[in-house]
């Protein structure tokens, strides 16, 4: 049989096409390895309820104080924000949060379960001089359970940590101040079940990207909206129950008068190269200190930088880190960051968000396949390589922050 360059080229192009269609996921996402890494897989879950049970089990094994904070307005769904606390020094604390963006919570939950297993084996070495450790599991339990990025009120919690006057200020702005209103139709289609609806949506976005650039779309989207209540990245009208519950947990379990330093990690997925993490700070002011804390080679950037991950975020407000820093006493020295793990390309993430949100509001009985695709955009649950990277990097960054907080002198 003679060798055919033409046939080989066609085969390679077809293989590349399949890879692109499968959203550039790691190869083992759809060609699973014949070996199973139990030491990795045991920490990750497929559903919110499985993840919660696993988190509670690991927390009890680590001799943590465990609390379930119910969301009373969602009592029929048995949804809770679960908290594990290992008491230590009143002067220093570390807070680790998963599930701020609902469906993204599976990665953070896996990291928390892995960390709690380590702490269970090290419990004898912890003392009252060690930092107080707080793990908040599934800050947005509705989104995690329903495979949504947004919460029960369609609110993006990471655009919701604002003071009342700031909500009012945002609502008083031009809805199109950053281009969101111009993109409302393709971002939030009202008739997603009509024939050709998705083709029309994609054509509009491609046209805008061609004429105004991808950064224009990204800035309009991630800047959020405080006017379109059924839109993606909606910031809400007031602090959501999850945010109020988080503040209450901190007020009840931290000695705010004695607290001097606090490290905070909020785990997210969806941005950046697949399987690699980026550490995102609120502003560039803390970059030098952060690079001293996290001395390996992962990217460290801030939302006011213009790199490939954070470009367009300069218009966004209401971040969890901003809310926590405002809530804590001004005397507390904070290091707050989002640890963002890359999954699939940004256009794939945006497509999944648009589809799921449109079906949620306008065709809820047909939403499930779109919800599963959204999960697959934010959580590469079939890829052992991706989960290994998430677990390893998540634990490493937590331990580096722990060392900094524990060794800090005032």
Image (cartoon, rainbow, N blue to C red):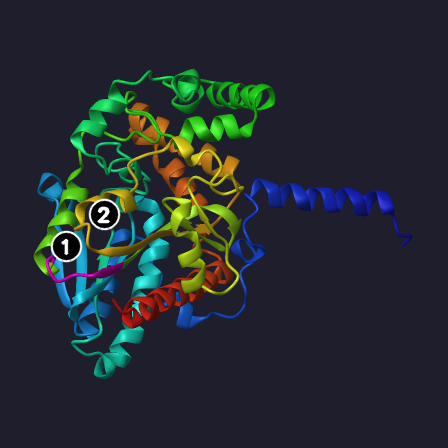
The residue drawn where x is 28% and y is 71% is 406
The image shows residue 49 at horizontal and vertical percentages of 24, 54
In the visual, does 164 lie left or right of 308? left
- Residue bounds of the magenta highlight: 256-262
Is 260 inside the magenta-drawn segment? Answer: yes
Q: Measured along the vertical axis of the image, is residue 20 above or below residue 360?
A: below
In the visual, does 175 lie left or right of 59? right
The image shows residue 46 at horizontal and vertical percentages of 34, 55
User: Would you say the residues marked 2 and 1 are in contact, meaning their CB atoms lie under 8 Å apart?
Assistant: yes
The residue drawn where x is 54% and y is 43% is 23
* Mark 2–mark 1 distance (CA, rounded to whole Å): 10 Å
Q: Measured along the vertical axis of the image, is residue 344 above or below residue 234?
A: below
Toward the viewer: 223 or 155?
223
Which is nearer the N-term, disc 2 or disc 1?
1
- Using a 10 Å C-alpha cutoff, classify the residue at mark 1 as few (fewer than 14 neighbours), some (14 to 19) or many (20 or more): some
Q: Measured along the vertical axis of the image, is residue 48 above or below residue 20?
A: below
Is 250 inside the magenta-drawn segment? Answer: no
Q: Which mark is residue 324?
A: 2
- Using a 10 Å C-alpha cutoff, classify the residue at mark 2 as few (fewer than 14 neighbours), some (14 to 19) or many (20 or more): some
What residue sits right under mark 1 in the picture?
A: 250
Q: Quadrant of residue 400?
A: bottom left
């Amino acid at each position: 049989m003679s060798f055919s360059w033409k046939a080989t080229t066609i085969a390679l192009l077809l293989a590349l096409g399949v890879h692109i269609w499968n959203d550039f996921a790691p190869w083992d996402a759809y060609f699973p390895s014949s070996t199973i890494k139990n030491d990795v897989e045991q920490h990750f879950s497929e559903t919110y309820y499985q993840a919660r049970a696993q988190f509670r089990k690991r927390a009890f094994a680590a001799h943590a104080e465990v609390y379930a904070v119910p969301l009373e307005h969602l009592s029929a769904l048995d949804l809770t924000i679960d908290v594990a606390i290992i008491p230590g020094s009143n002067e220093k604390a570390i807070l680790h949060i998963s599930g701020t963006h609902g469906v993204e919570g599976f990665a953070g939950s896996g990291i928390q379960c892995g960390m709690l297993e380590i702490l269970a084996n090290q419990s004898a070495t912890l003392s009252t001089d060690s930092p107080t450790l707080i793990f908040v599991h599934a800050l947005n339990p509705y989104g995690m359970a329903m495979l949504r990025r947004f919460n029960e009120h369609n609110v993006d919690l990471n655009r919701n940590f604002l003071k009342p006057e700031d909500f009012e200020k945002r609502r008083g702005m031009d809805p199109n101040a950053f281009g969101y209103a111009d993109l409302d139709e393709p971002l939030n289609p009202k008739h997603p079940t009509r024939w050709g609806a998705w083709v029309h949506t994609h054509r509009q976005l491609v046209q805008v990207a061609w004429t105004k650039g991808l950064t224009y779309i990204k800035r309009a989207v991630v800047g959020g909206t405080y006017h379109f209540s059924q839109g993606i990245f909606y910031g809400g009208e007031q602090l959501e129950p999850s945010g109020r519950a988080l503040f209450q947990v901190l007020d009840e379990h931290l000695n705010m008068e004695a607290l001097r330093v606090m490290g905070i990690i909020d785990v997210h997925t969806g941005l950046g190269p697949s399987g690699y993490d980026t550490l995102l700070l609120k502003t560039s002011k803390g970059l030098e200190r952060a690079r001293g804390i996290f001395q390996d080679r992962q990217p460290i950037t801030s939302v006011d930088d213009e790199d490939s991950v954070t470009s367009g975020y300069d218009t966004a407000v209401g971040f969890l880190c901003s809310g926590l820093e405002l809530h804590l006493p001004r005397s507390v020295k904070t290091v707050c960051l989002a640890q963002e793990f890359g999954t699939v390309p940004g256009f794939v993430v945006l497509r999944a968000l648009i589809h799921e949100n449109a079906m949620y509001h306008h065709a809820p009985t047909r939403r499930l396949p779109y919800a599963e695709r959204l999960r697959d955009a934010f959580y590469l649950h079939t890829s052992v390589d991706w989960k290994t990277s998430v677990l390893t990097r998540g634990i490493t960054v937590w331990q580096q922050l722990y060392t900094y907080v524990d060794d800090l002198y005032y």
